[in-house]
Amino acid sequence: MGACCVSGVRPPRSCSVPSVPAWGCPGRPTAHKTASRQQAWPEHKAVHKSAVSAGEAWLFCTKRGKARSDTMPGYAWTGPLRPARIGPTRQVPEHIQRPDYAVTGIATAEQESKQQRAVAIRSAEEAAGIRRACRVGREVLDAAAAVVRPGITTDEIDRVVHDAMVEAGAYPSPLNYYNFPKSVCTSVNEVICHGIPDQRELEDGDIVNVDVTAYIGGYHGDLNETFTAGKVDEAGRQLIKVTHDALMKAVEMCRPGVRYRDLGETISKHVQQAGMSVVKTYCGHGIGDLFHCAPNIPHYAHNKAVGVMKEGQVFTIEPMVNLGTWRDVLWPDGWTAATADGQRSAQFEHQLLITATGAEVLTARLPTSPPLWWEAEQ
């Protein structure tokens, strides 16, 4: 959940679904079937209501995570993907330190912080804490990448991420951030960002972005990558590679004195040369003891970002690149951003610390990280 809205922070295992009992063959019901239906339906409703009250039902997410529905909301979907039902909220053990919004759903400390206006300069102690969170985030993302394949649900990816976070003693930062209902964002095909893990199984040829953030020791570590499920066509593979390379070209620029706005020029040039477009609605952001803070890092050309990089600053760069238009739409769940034309989107993200001579990539890939598609072919 690295991406924030450019106008400010926008709070941007397989399972069978309970179903109504089959009532027999179509046609006019017999008196016996009618009586059975009259008896069974109230029982089904009672069980369903009990499950909903207990937070155990699989339902559609609505109202930015604050509500659930038993029916899929109507919407003019721009591509073939549809939301599926989401499972119950996963719990974090009480002994694990958590941010303020874990209980309330509102990031009060973030809203009230001076870091929304002034970019923090991190001390060596703070940098060490952030570095630790980023290492946990990297190891958890690698665990998620290892299970991506056709047939796995994004809810199962969420379970893997959640369990790995807990095992590491970390809180999954997306969970209940402005009521986001899951521990990771999984954005499939035409979904740009903030996709909610659900019971849909990945299909052969899908691409999926997995966006992980770990909160441990009072600091957040944020990163994401886009993976292939099975055999992906050449357009999808190139979309992923172009997005990755655009990020790395921007990372190479980072050092004291570089203007934040200049990153968008480099990213856009690389993306446009490939005939693709850069999303403008969401941007990179400052991060540390807060999930989102100053500075904003737009990824498109001719942006108006203010400020220059200074030693000790920590922020993310996370370009979202589309095969078609850069424009996006928001699904009825209030979180999922999708391409306006239904074409696919990819994203990569790193968290950086500006040093005296350049930048340290705090979320850098490890020798043990599962290979990306072009690495696997080398």
Image (tube, helix red, strand yellow):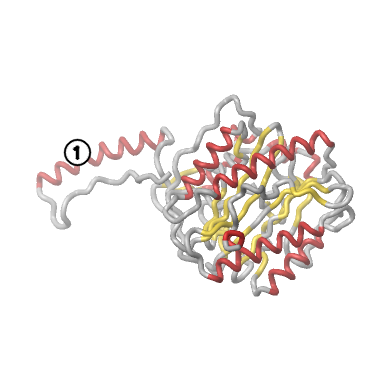
Up-down: is 244 above or below 99? below
Up-down: is 195 above or below 341? above
Frontmost residue, 140 versus 69: 140
Frontmost residue, 194 versus 253: 253
Outermost residue to the left: 31
Q: Residue at x 63, y 48 (%)?
A: 1
Q: Quadrant of the C terminus?
A: bottom right
Q: Label 1: few (<14), some or many (≥20) within 10 Å?
A: few
Q: Confirm whether residue 73 shows in the render.
A: no
Q: How many marks?
A: 1
Q: Which residue is drawn at 77% across and 36% down?
A: 128
Place of residue 90 in the rendered image (x, y in percent of width and height, measured from the top left): 50, 36
Place of residue 359 in the rendered image (x, y in percent of width and height, measured from the top left): 81, 51
Frontmost residue, 219 versus 370: 370
* Amino acid residing under circle 1: Gln
Q: Confirm whether residue 283 shows in the render.
A: yes
Q: In this view, does 99 lie to the left or right of 125?
A: left
Place of residue 303 in the rendered image (x, y in percent of width and height, measured from the top left): 78, 63
Query: Is label 1 in a helix, a strand or a loop?
Result: helix
Q: In this view, does 75 lie to the left or right of 344?
A: left
Q: Which residue is drawn at 39% across and 51% down?
A: 71
Q: In this view, does 17 lie to the left or right of 260?
A: left
Q: Where, by quadrant of the figure, is residue 164 drawn?
A: top right
Place of residue 30 in the rendered image (x, y in percent of width and height, measured from the top left): 10, 49
Outermost residue to the top: 95
> Mark 1 = which residue?
39
Q: Residue at x 74, y 44 (%)?
A: 287
